[in-house]
Amino acid sequence: MNTRMFRKILIVNRGEIAVRIIRACRDLGIRTAVMFSEADRTAMHVRMADEAYSLPGNTPAESYLRQDRIIEIAKRSAADAVHPGYGFLSENPEFAERVESEGIKFIGPSARAIRALGDKTAARKVADRLQIPTVPGTSESVSNERQAYSIASKVGYPVLLKAAAGGGGKGMRIVRAEAELANSFRTAKSEAENAFGDDHVYIEKYIAHPRHVEIQILSDSQGNAVYLGERECSIQRRHQKLIEETPSTIVDNEMRKAMGESAVRLVQAVDYGGAGTVEYLVDEHGHFFFLEVNTRLQVEHPVTEMVTGIDLVHQQILVSAGERLSVTQAKISPKGHSIECRICAEDPQDSFFPSTGLLLKYSTPQGPNVRVDNGFSEGDSISTFYDPLMAKVITWGSNRSQAIETMKRALAEFMIQGVKSTIPFCVFAMNNKQFCDGDFNTDFVKTVFNPKQVDPVSTQDQIAAAVTAALLQSGAQTKQTVFMDHQSENHSTWKTLRLESYR
Ligand code: ADP
């Protein structure tokens, strides 16, 4: 085997995940290059990386999705690998191909494997072939209304129209009765075209009150693959996850083995190399159905790291450099329980509406059994351009209730002033009997969460407000001052900040 460790990795992302990858690279002695849009000029990932390259513009289309500019930066920085993180270009097979055609390694599975599993209908076909149960529905996209009627009546209402290229909880429409189908079908197609540049939609049975349970897999380019247990991700808003944990309260050893082995068979069938996640829905009778594969690192990967002790980003990098998987299935023995709360700039009292502004006060929790994957600091701005995720708080406990107690302590320590956050929702969940009993499903936010029960001015907000008021009174708190403080703190000679505008 011919392993050549990378000297420099270009990270094509921003926020907490870019910071997370920088840390993994540092651990492995690899230099890092990042890029930044105009709004991100002073962002934490820029301050932390060894090199930073500017991208003009602010929208994802002008910046973090501009393949031509990114490839140019990859060449200019002499990076020998590109890590895409999640979102943006992470599941784009054309991008993976373009990177590799320049002789630069794409850290992730091959373009062929992304094509085979990244498209939801293509992945369903692979699962069907392997006789892995899929959510009842079609594995071909539906071409016209007549076909939609015939499939929906076979599957039985309610059904879900889903964009084949969908992601991030977008591109799904529930159809509860036949009368709604034609209209919903037309709307779903045009929404899919607008959001993903691909109007293919397919039909799935809408599973009532399901749990979302997923399996983390790791594989190398020599065909070795393992599963690292499950993650329970049922606490969601708008079909997007908010709280994740491992193990799931509904998964026993037998179910874990069945789900894990199915996931491994699926990735082995397409010669997958790298980290990936196979997602399932579990119905009220405990039956699991394949949902989709995410051919990249997941936001919620840290809970798996907390219980297994395996650093998934290290593993991604090592496997991409050609190393054999160093872990075997027999050696994976998760310990204890881990929970992650996503701290997003959203208002839980206003339907999780995104909140923007300046982080006047921002201080993250610390202490035993608490990990914080964070991408922001005090003085940074939260804009409308990107995903509202600011940080993730991850706790570990020898059992679930200990992990919950530690999460309550950590959330109380997190101080944010300047934007609304999902912290009050997470506090609600940690104190909710149904959540604590493990008795919940993907409807939790809609049916259990009561925004009126959330204390809008929590203790932490009061403390933060007092601190901010004191700072403002002393005249010390301006955006510029904060930025300069951070820059001087982090200044060091190895850093090359390339601020020249892109040519
Ligand atoms: P995305 O790729 O946009 O995240 P997924 O297919 O992974 O979309 O689904 C996201 C969430 O939407 C699931 O976790 C679940 O809550 C809901 N969902 C998706 N498909 C179904 C279904 N057939 N029945 C019920 N809920 C579903």
Image (cartoon, rainbow, N blue to C red):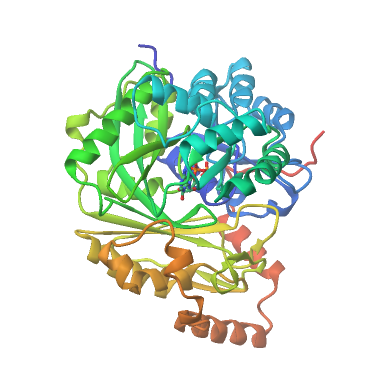
37 relative to 205 in the view: left or right: right
105 relative to 1 in the view: left or right: right
Which residue is most to the right? 503
Task: Return the x and y of residue 70 as percentages of the image width and height.
Answer: 68, 32
* Whether residue 492 can be seen here: no
Up-down relation of residue 258 to residue 325 (above or below)? below
* Whether residue 87 can be seen here: yes
Closest to the observer, 403 or 496: 403
Task: Return the x and y of residue 88 as percentages of the image width and height.
Answer: 62, 39
Task: Return the x and y of residue 108 as percentages of the image width and height.
Answer: 48, 28
Question: Which quadrant does the N terminus fall into?
Answer: top left
302 relative to 146 in the view: left or right: left
Question: Which quadrant does the C terminus fall into?
Answer: top right
Q: Residue at x 33, y 66 (%)?
A: 435
Closest to the observer, 290 or 354: 290
Q: Residue at x 39, y 27 (%)?
A: 318
